[in-house]
Image (cartoon, rainbow, N blue to C red):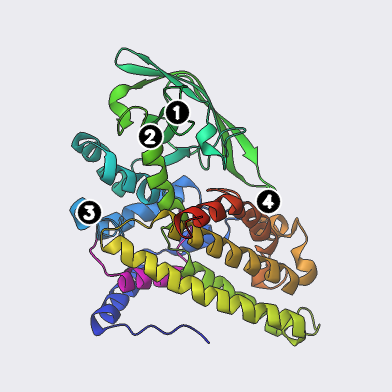
């Protein structure tokens, strides 16, 4: 059964206000840019156009606390906003400054740092990437080896970061570095902010299985970063990092988009391809789809619970954020797997590139097939990035079950 929330009259009034804004500001070219994006996120220029429109309306970061420019909306209202954006076709935007860095700044930055960075995150002027993972230090992030050695009022940073999403677009990076090699791995780590055009920063592309350039390797060779750009105390960056990861894994905001994808899957599975019997007629496929719907309904409840915590001033919590990360990834991957089966031979690996080619003429096959192969391949990495499923289960065992 679908999930039915009881929204108040005030909520429904806001829904109509959001719809009016989307009708006026969400241009056809923005929707098309999102549709034609075969990766996870649209390019920076598209993201910044939409971010400026949101910020002008006062919705640059709807989930932020009011004192920093947020809306003060209830969890239900945040849910409505995301649902209407997904329904209207708002492009998928990577806003690591707003969703990841900002909560860390709220909690640990100086007033000067907040005044410097938060307004530029809201306006879209700053476009951030995340310098966490390294070769050999991904899910085991505490083993990172990028060094930062003190030199007067600066740190000299050497090392490399990998799988850095949109580093080729970003003008700033928030980065974990080791400032003290002694003691436990979690100790001696600091959290630095610096510009990507700082001398010594070099970005090399990594092409994904889906054929997209979204991730990169970032090389840091004698990069000079002012000590004033450190967030939190020296050697206490692991605390900042854990706080940020709760928002990466459990910040929510995915259920609305997954609902659209789930409905598209149900439609194509009910129609059949080129006269063939629809997959919904297959008992096993139908059973898998019904189980997916149950799992999605549970995910919606989890997202609302997370939103309630955020609005009340709490952070997601490590155990809850890990549970949400696993649940959302499993739903996404299952949707993409079943859609791949439902579109049949239109899911060949190169179908997305052929169908999106400007010279290809009309779309090849049904609309849900256009991105099926690329979405499937892109989503396979989701159970690894942000901490693998195995790591999330270890966190749940410790934080929730007390094992």
Q: For the magenta stretch, what is the residue range?
A: 71-93
Label 1 or label 3, whichever comes before in sequence order: 3
Instruction: Say few, some or many: other residues with alpha carbon within 10 Å of mark 2 (under 14 / 14 to 19 / 20 or more).
Output: many
Which mark is first along the chain, 4 or 1?
A: 1
Whole-angstrom CA distance, mark 4 to mark 3, is 37 Å
Numbered disc 2: secondary structure: helix
**Which badge, 2 or 4, comes first in the chain's sequence?**
4
Secondary structure, mark 3, is: loop
> Is 243 situated above or below 196?
below
Residue under label 4: 210
The residue depicted at 28 percent of the width and 40 percent of the height is 108
* Mark 3 or 2, nearer chain start: 3
Can you tell which mark lies on residue 58?
A: none
Instruction: Please indicate whether residue 36 sits to the left or right of residue 322 in the image.
Output: right
In the rendered image, residue 76 lying in the magenta stretch gets the answer yes
Mark nearer the N terminus (4 vs 3): 3
Confirm whether residue 88 shows in the render. no
**Residue 337 picture location, percent across and down:** 69, 66
Residue 177: numbered disc: 1
Pick the front one: 21 or 99: 99
Q: Residues within 10 Å of mark 1 (few under 14, many from 20)?
A: many
Q: CA distance from mark 3 to mark 2?
A: 26 Å
Could you say where residue 150 lies in the image, as x and y percent from the top left? Answer: 37, 16
* Magenta segment includes 141: no
**Secondary element type, mark 4:** loop
Kindly identify which residue carries mark 2. 237
In the figure, residue 104 lies in which quadrant?
top left
Say which of 313 and 236 sits in front: 236
Q: Are marks 3 and 2 in contact (CB under 8 Å)?
A: no
């Amino acid at each position: 059964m679908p999930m039915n929330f009881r929204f108040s009259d005030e909520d429904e009034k806001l829904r109509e206000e959001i719809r009016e804004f989307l009708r006026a500001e969400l241009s056809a070219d923005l929707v098309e840019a999102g549709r034609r994006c075969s990766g996870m996120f649209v390019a920076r220029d598209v993201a910044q156009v939409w971010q400026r429109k949101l910020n002008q309306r006062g919705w640059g970061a709807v989930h932020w606390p009011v004192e920093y420019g947020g809306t003060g909306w209830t969890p239900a209202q945040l849910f409505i906003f995301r649902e209407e954006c997904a329904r209207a076709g708002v492009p998928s935007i990577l806003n690591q400054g707003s969703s990841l860095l900002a909560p860390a700044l709220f909690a640990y930055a100086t007033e000067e740092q907040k005044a410097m960075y938060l307004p530029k995150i809201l306006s879209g002027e700053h476009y951030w990437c995340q310098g966490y993972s390294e070769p050999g230090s991904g899910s085991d992030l505490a083993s990172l080896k990028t060094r930062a050695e003190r030199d007067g009022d600066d740190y000299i940073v050497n090392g490399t970061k990998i799988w850095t999403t949109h580093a080729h677009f970003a003008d700033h990076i928030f980065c974990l570095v080791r400032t003290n090699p002694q003691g436990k791995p979690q100790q001696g780590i600091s959290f630095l902010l610096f510009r990507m055009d700082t001398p010594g920063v070099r970005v090399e592309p990594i092409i994904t299985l889906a054929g997209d350039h979204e991730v990169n390797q970032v090389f840091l060779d004698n990069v000079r970063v002012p000590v004033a750009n450190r967030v939190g105390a020296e050697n206490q960056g692991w605390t900042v990092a854990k706080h940020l990861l709760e928002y990466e894994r459990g910040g929510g905001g995915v259920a609305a988009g997954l609902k659209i994808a789930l409905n598209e899957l149900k439609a194509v599975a009910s129609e059949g391809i080129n006269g063939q019997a629809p997959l919904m007629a297959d008992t096993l496929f139908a059973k898998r789809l019904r189980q997916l719907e149950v799992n999605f309904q549970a995910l919606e409840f989890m997202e609302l619970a997370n939103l309630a915590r955020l609005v009340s001033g709490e952070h997601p919590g490590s155990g809850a954020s890990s549970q949400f990360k696993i649940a959302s990834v499993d739903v996404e991957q299952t949707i993409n797997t079943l859609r791949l089966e439902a579109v049949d031979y239109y899911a060949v690996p190169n179908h997305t590139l052929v169908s999106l080619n400007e010279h290809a003429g009309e779309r090849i096959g049904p609309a849900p097939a256009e991105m099926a192969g690329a979405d499937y391949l892109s989503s396979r990495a989701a159970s690894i990035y942000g901490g693998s499923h195995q790591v999330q289960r270890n966190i749940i065992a410790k934080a929730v079950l007390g094992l």
